[in-house]
Image (cartoon, rainbow, N blue to C red):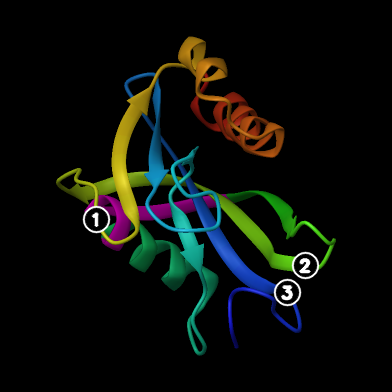
Amino acid sequence: MTRSYPERPMVGVGAVAIRDGRVLLIRRGRAPRLGEWSLPGGAQRLGETVEEAIHREMIEETGLEVEPLDVVAVVDFIDRDEVGAIRYHYTLIDFAVRIIGGTPRAGDDAAALSWVAPEDLEALALPEDTLRVIRLAWTPLFAP
């Protein structure tokens, strides 16, 4: 199935990793959202569980091995072109994750990565859905 102009939604996964009071974000190196900051993640592959997809995507994009803790939210990302046709449609399953190994580095379709403090999130112009997912993960699982 093609990612752009699909016949049906694709399933994707996202990871909220928080360490030392900062959340891990990547700058997208490919469409959709090329150049924008977002949570690491990507499309689930055929025959892969969502937890396996989280493990693979985190290693590919960030070099980090993770343990999924819990599903934080399910979000629909629908992007339409100039005439209103659906260019991308992902149903994203976002997990809170714990880092268990690896060395942070931008890889695969991540152009950069950064650990971002809560007070700096607004300046990155993150989509409201992304901010909501980060807040949901932060509060119950990582609050001091």
Q: Which SS class for mark 1?
A: loop
| Mark 1 burial class by Cα count in 10 Å: few <14, some 14-19, many 20+ | some
Q: Which is in the foreground here, disc 2 or disc 1?
A: 2
* Residue 88 included in the magenta stretch of the image: no
Give the Cα separation between the discs numbered 1 and 3.
25 Å
Specify whether residue 61 is painted magenta.
Answer: yes
Q: At numbered mark 3, what does the secondary structure look like: helix, strand or loop?
A: loop
- 22 horizontally vs 44: left or right: left
Q: Are marks 1 and 3 in contact (CB under 8 Å)?
A: no
Residue 144 appearing in the image: no
Range of the magenta residues? Answer: 60-70
Residue type at the position of mark 1: Gly
* Mark earlier in primary sequence (2, 3): 3
Q: CA distance from mark 2 to mark 3?
A: 10 Å
Specify which label sits upstream in the sequence, 2 or 1.
2
Looking at the rendering, which quadrant does residue 58 occupy? bottom left
Expressed as whole percent of the image width and height from the top left, the position of residue 110 reads 33, 51
- Numbered circle sitting on residue 107: 1
Q: What's the residue at 49%, 16% (across, down)?
A: 118
| Residue that badge 2 annotates | 86
For residue 76, what is the image quadrant? Answer: bottom right
